[in-house]
Amino acid sequence: MNTLLKEFGLAGPDKLTLRDKYSLSTSVFVQCMGIDVHVSIEGSGPDVVMIHGFAASLHTWDETAKQLSKQFRVIRFDLPPFGLTGPVLDEQGFARKMDVAFYQQFVDALLDELNIKKCVMVGNSFGGFLSWDQAQRHPERVRGLIISDAVGYQQPLPVYIRLFTFKTIAWLTRYTIPAFLLRMAVRDVYGDKTKIKKEVMNRYLELFMHKPNRSAVGQMVGVFTDGELGAERLVDVQAKTLIVWGDKDRWVSIDMASRFHRDMPNSELKIYRGVGHIPMEETPERFAIDCITFIETL
């Protein structure tokens, strides 16, 4: 019975249990905009900030961070409402709407709180958007930029995100969501599904299915649907940029890679054959080497 309840998000670990299980030895919780943000800081040297995408967590960078932290100070964090950060609540205790302006304010405030003066931004998917957005709005802070399978242009949403744009489904997530949908979504972001580790799948399930997290997802999907993301600003990004893309990406079309490369004046493009939407997780060794090589050229 307990297994069945977990499959529909009706049972599962509480917040403290999840913190004990998924906090790292490098984890700290930083107060920002009224919430405890899960942050990992490791290594020493020039600052490298990593931002994950939709439904992920800072753990998506685990293997990449392990390599980069040998040369750099790596800072990564869980975006609300995901990971161990969870949602931002309004005065009534409900998850507040998290639009593009909210995330811009959040990243600005957190980097200020962490005293990040100059860094390389590394972002995947929606984290890729937040990274190039930071470089465009705060060129004084970003000395280099690495974006992977990034969001930037309007396009059809992946079905697993589009589901949450329906009001009925967004309302239902307050109470239940089938775990099989999340398993399908995780498999969908890998080019080679055989590379998905059991412990990684379990982590995605436990963190996403945690009631406060999944209940808030309907309050953030508007970032993909409400108005433009401002792709016209890409031409203003002056930071030297590495664009990485998996040619088996089913979430953000490979066609977008060439558009980013065309519109960003100081960019280079690397295509990973046979790889999906999250190269840093599917092929971390190659991704880490490319990141280090690029950063050393700055």
Image (spheres, rainbow, N blue to C red):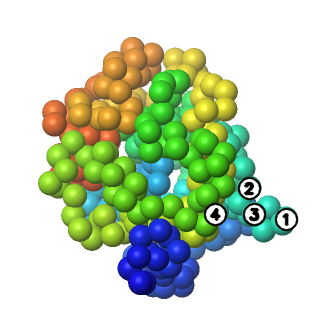
> In front of the other: label 2 or label 4?
4
Q: Secondary structure at mark 2?
A: loop
Q: Are marks 1 and 3 in contact (CB under 8 Å)?
A: no
What residue does disc 1 label?
A: 91
Quadrant of the image occupied by residue 88: bottom right
Q: Earlier in the sequence, mark 2 or mark 4?
A: 2
Nearer the observer, 170 or 94: 170
In the rendering, at what x and y percent does residue 172 appear? 61, 58
> In front of the other: label 4 or label 3?
4
Q: Point out the residue furthest to the top here.
A: 262
Nearer the observer, 226 or 128: 226
What residue does disc 2 label?
A: 96
Q: Earlier in the sequence, mark 2 or mark 1?
A: 1
* Disc 4 residue crowd, few under 14, some 14–19, many 20+, Cα 10 Å: some
* Disc 1 residue crowd, few under 14, some 14–19, many 20+, Cα 10 Å: few
Please give the name of the residue rendered at 19% of the width and 50% of the height, measured from the top-left corner.
Answer: 193
What residue does disc 3 label?
A: 94
Q: Secondary structure at mark 4?
A: loop
Gap between marks 4 and 3 measured at Cα: 10 Å
> In front of the other: label 4 or label 1?
4
Nearer the observer, 138 or 194: 194
- The image shows a total of numbered marks equal to 4
Gap between marks 2 and 1 measured at Cα: 9 Å
Gap between marks 2 and 4 measured at Cα: 13 Å
What residue does disc 4 label?
A: 174
Q: Amino acid at mark 4?
A: Arg
Q: Are marks 3 and 2 in contact (CB under 8 Å)?
A: yes
Q: Amino acid at mark 3?
A: Phe
Left or right side of 195 for 85: right
